Image (cartoon, rainbow, N blue to C red):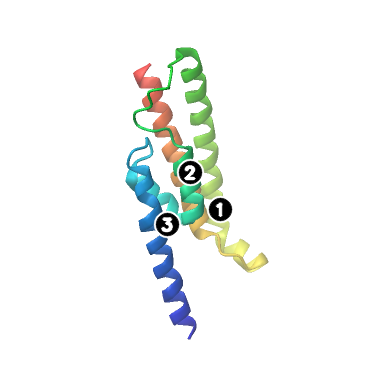
């Protein structure tokens, strides 16, 4: 009975991911980063991350070189922090599960991925500038 509920939960998770992740196609984040965030965090958190990503073509966007570089440095620093935080969560997830009973293995992987995404986006922004 427990295996059946786990199967339905996993099936629902994959179905919601398949519905939410395509929102990233017309955004800077893209489809596959959307799938990654939906799968390792949750479809709801993935939808929030995708919705905060800028659209690929934004006619109202005015480029400010100084602000872009400042934002890129902030993204890069935040990205490195999230990679370190995710690595710690990943490494200590077994002990945290034993202490408080919450399994956070996938959140560690999700934070590592979010950090890598932010660092790569920052490097793209600095490279273009």
Q: Quadrant of residue 27?
A: top left
Give coordinates of residue 49: x percent, y percent.
Answer: 48, 43
Residue at (56%, 50%) from the top-left corner? 88
- Picture quarter with the C terminus: top left
Look at the numbered disc 2 and give the secondary structure of its residue. Answer: helix
Q: Along the polypeptide, which appears first: circle 1 or circle 3?
A: 3
Q: Residue furthest right?
A: 100
Residue 4, compared with residue 12, is above or below; it is below
> Are circles 1 and 3 on residues that touch, CB within 8 Å?
no
The residue that disc 1 covers is: 89
Frontmost residue, 19 versus 66: 19
Look at the numbered disc 3 and give the secondary structure of its residue. Answer: helix
Give coordinates of residue 72: x percent, y percent.
Answer: 47, 25
Residue at (51%, 36%) from the top-left corner? 80
User: From mark 1 to mark 3, how far is it between C-alphas?
Assistant: 17 Å
Question: Label 3 crowding class (10 Å Cα cut-off): few <14, some 14-19, many 20+?
Answer: many
The residue that disc 3 covers is: 39
The residue that disc 2 covers is: 49
Look at the numbered disc 1 and give the secondary structure of its residue. Answer: helix
User: Which mark's residue is nearer the viewer, 2 or 1?
Assistant: 2
User: From mark 2 to mark 1, how far is it between C-alphas?
Assistant: 20 Å
Question: Label 2 crowding class (10 Å Cα cut-off): few <14, some 14-19, many 20+?
Answer: some
Frontmost residue, 47 versus 104: 47
Q: Along the polypeptide, which appears first: circle 2 or circle 1?
A: 2
Residue 63 placement, left or right of 45 = left
User: From mark 3 to mark 2, how far is it between C-alphas?
Assistant: 12 Å
């Amino acid at each position: 009975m427990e295996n059946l509920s786990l199967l339905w939960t996993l099936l629902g998770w994959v179905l919601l991911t398949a519905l939410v992740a395509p929102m990233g196609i017309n955004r800077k984040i893209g489809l596959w980063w959307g799938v990654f965030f939906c799968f390792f965090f949750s479809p709801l958190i993935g939808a929030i991350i995708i919705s905060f990503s800028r659209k690929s073509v934004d006619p109202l966007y005015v480029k400010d070189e100084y602000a872009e570089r400042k934002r890129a440095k902030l993204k890069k620093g935040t990205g490195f922090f999230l990679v370190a935080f995710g690595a710690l969560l990943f490494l200590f997830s077994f002990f945290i599960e034993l202490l408080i009973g919450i399994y956070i293995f996938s959140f560690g992987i999700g934070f590592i991925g979010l950090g890598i995404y932010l660092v790569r986006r920052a490097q793209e922004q600095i490279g273009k500038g």
